[in-house]
Amino acid sequence: MKTYNFDEHINRKSTSSVKWDETVRVFGRGDVLPMWVADMDFRAPIEVTKAIIEKANHGIFGYTSISPSVDEAVKSWFLNRHGWNLNNEWFTYISGVVPALSATIQAFSNPMDKVIVFSPVYYPFYDMISHNERTILTSPMNYKHGRYHMDLEHFEAQLLDGTVKMLLLCNPHNPGGTVWTREELRQLGEICVKHNVVVVADEIHADLIFKGHTYTPFASISEEIARQTVTCIAPTKTFNIAGLQAAIMVTSNHTLREKMEFFMKKQGHFTLNIFGITAMEAAYRHGEQWLKEVMDYIEENMDIAVSFIQKEIPEVNVVKPEGTYLLWIDCRKLGLKDEELTRLLLHKGKLALDSGKKFGKEADGFIRMNIACTRSTLNEGLERLKLALL
Ligand SMILES: Cc1ncc(COP(=O)(O)O)c(C=O)c1O
């Protein structure tokens, strides 16, 4: 029996939502349908809300530590769901995965060092490297039949001179929705071990996987790979609680952990927001049913979106992703410049989507559509997409 009704329209305007309230600042229009920022238009699991209300009702919001029961909830989730056996000594809590990317870059490398990414990729990867004055190196991926493939020969060739210190890996991949297979990750991991490259694996999309695909934690592949890796995990994408800002950097490597912890101390960070901690525990402890239902709904949305686009807008190419709630639409056949594509979407379709170019120059001509919304918003968005592109 279903517990949740994801068809319910919940007004998010004037709630300080980045997705709904910042379109004027970002796109120059307030009358567009927002299907850009990666959060869901659904309420979080009821158990999360209840836990927060209970905490709020207590009324004392003093300095709060992260109790062992939070560690236990995280460990059980990853063991039961992904077969990944974690040790709570491996955890360093942090307010978000993007802050974790920045923290690890600062902890493990020096200004001007090279940090590599597979492009295209979630654009804050580039920002965190460049804002920290490191050098961005890219290994462009091949996009074949609607799926990204890492070019490991090209990747390894870039490591040969020994100057690349780190890889930022997106597993599963945003924006492509590719769920890397164990074999793909194993081959990648062996190269990183061989060339002594530290891997920071952003696994925030780990739980958003469609039927027939399996998420593999990069660090679970082998002891050697684990020793070389820091994995960033978070309940925020999974349970739609990004505003609560809670994540964990996980590594079995003592030396890497000491460096991260030193960095965190230097920054003056020692705990999380009280509501972030509360939500994290409640979500991992009680969120399973909600996640099952939301993923069924999202997968149906994805199927509807893909078949609509294939039938109604045959000029563009789209393939159902393997995971995430992000639809990656290949508009290259239209032959439009990125600016023109954005202009049509915004001013003809009144639709706010992310342009592919943000994710890397290889993605010029693509657009990213967030379909974690009610069915009626989805249908409206698809009609607007058609209007814009035809
Ligand atoms: C791959 C990836 N990493 C990190 C984030 C953001 O993480 P956080 O909100 O914890 O900084 C997102 C959000 O879209 C994402 O897609």
Image (cartoon, rainbow, N blue to C red):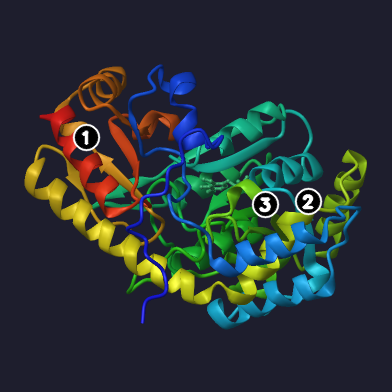
**Tag 3 near tag 2, CB within 8 Å:** no
**Residue 132 higher or lower than 377, as above or below:** above
According to the image, label 2 marks what residue? 273
Q: CA distance from mark 3 to mark 1?
A: 35 Å
Q: CA distance from mark 1 to mark 2?
A: 42 Å
Horizontally, residue 72 falls left or right of residue 41, namely right
Q: Front-most of 275 and 212?
A: 275
Q: CA distance from mark 3 to mark 2?
A: 33 Å
The numbered mark, 3 or 1, whose residue comes first in the sequence reads 3
Q: Is mark 2 within 8 Å of ligand 1?
A: no
Residue 319 x %, y %: 23, 53
- Single out the mark in the foreground, 1 or 2: 2
Horizontally, residue 150 falls left or right of residue 285, namely left
Which three-letter amino acid code belongs to the residue tagged 1?
A: Cys
Q: Is mark 1 within 8 Å of ligand 1?
A: no
According to the image, label 1 marks what residue? 331
The numbered mark, 1 or 2, whose residue comes first in the sequence reads 2
Residue 112 x %, y %: 72, 28
Name the quarter where the C terminus is drawn: top left
- Single out the mark in the foreground, 3 or 1: 1
Which three-letter amino acid code belongs to the residue tagged 2?
A: Asn
**Tag 1 near tag 2, CB within 8 Å:** no
Where disc 3 sits, the SS reads loop
According to the image, label 3 marks what residue? 197
